[in-house]
Image (tube, grey):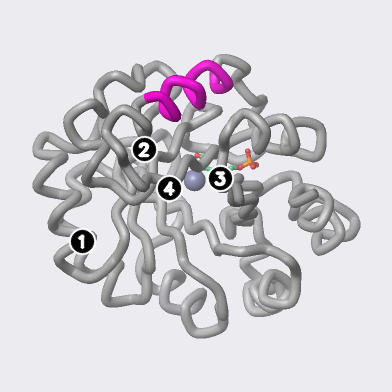
Amino acid sequence: MKNRLIAPSVLSADFGNLQRDIEMINESQADWFHVDVMDGRFVPNISFGFPVMKSIKKHAKKFIDVHLMIVEPEKYVEEFVKEGADLVSVHYEACVHLHRTIHQIKDLGAKAGVVLNPSTPVSVLEDVIADVDLVLLMSVNPGFGGQKFIENTYKKIQQTKELIEKYNSKALIEIDGGVNQHNAAKLFEAGADVLVAGNAVFSAENPAAMIEELKK
Ligand code: DX5
Ligand code: ZN
């Protein structure tokens, strides 16, 4: 059976009420916590680092999916795994030695993902697809929540599926940016396994009901 996993992005949570928002996710039908780390260098925004990661881990009862939007991620992956990341994804565009970084994450005992910006073609994954647990396709330019979904993502899902098949890879496909109740079903049908949702969930009147709707 196809996966239909929902990963609410903590980036859009109310940081003054972080425990409350994490408990909402714990009790909802959400599958993963998506944790967006931004350094103000790889992306034009700064989000949070280890202290907030620690607080998330303290309360979260589900799988923790860490998305590193930082330069030189190899310097920090060990600490994120130590702080409780189950999966660490690094950007193709931020890794000079991507193969090494993927194996560094796996050797630490976590799952390893690779992320592509909207302008990066899927074909660059040809030589690592067999090694990764997840391909994260950005459907907005990374840096901010609440942006408009880029339609070209559907084509990239198809290309990623073909690459996964060609190399007999076990990688899941995750989509991040502009996911909402209007495109979620279409994305799952196109072949996405995991959908990240920040704004759609946390700006909803009833976030738990929105998570349920996205999963349908
Ligand atoms: C964007 C982040 C996303 C973001 C998604 O740089 O990687 O995870 O929070 O937010 P929405 O769902 O609001 O587009
Ligand atoms: Zn993200």
Kindly identify which residue carries mark 3. 193
- Which secondary structure lies at badge 2? strand
- State the residue position of label 1: 106
Q: CA distance from mark 1 to mark 3?
A: 21 Å
Mark 2 vs mark 1, foreground winner is 1
Q: In this picture, which residue range is highlighted in magenta?
A: 153-162
Q: What is the CA distance from the residue labelled 3 to the residue labelled 4?
A: 28 Å
Q: Which-is-in-front pick, marks 4 and 1?
A: 1
Query: Residue at (30%, 67%) from the top-left corner?
Result: 80
Helix, strand or loop at mark 4: loop
Callout in the foreground (3, 2): 3
Residue in the foreground of this view, choosing between 32 and 159: 159
Give the foreground label among 4 and 2.
2
Amino acid type of the residue tagged 3 in the rendering: Asp
Lower sequence index among marks 4 and 2: 4
Label 3 vs label 4, nearer the camera:
3
- Where on the picture, by quarter, is residue 79? bottom left
Which residue was labeled with disc 4?
46
Callout 3 environment at 10 Å: few (<14), some (14 to 19), or many (20+)?
some
- With respect to residue 65, does 120 lie above or below? above
Measured in 3D between alpha carbons, the distance from the residue under mark 3 to the one under mark 2, in whole angstroms, is 15 Å
* Residue assigned mark 2: 115
Is the CB–ligand 2 distance for label 2 below 8 Å?
yes
**Label 4: few (<14), some (14–19) or many (≥20) C-alpha neighbours in 10 Å:** some
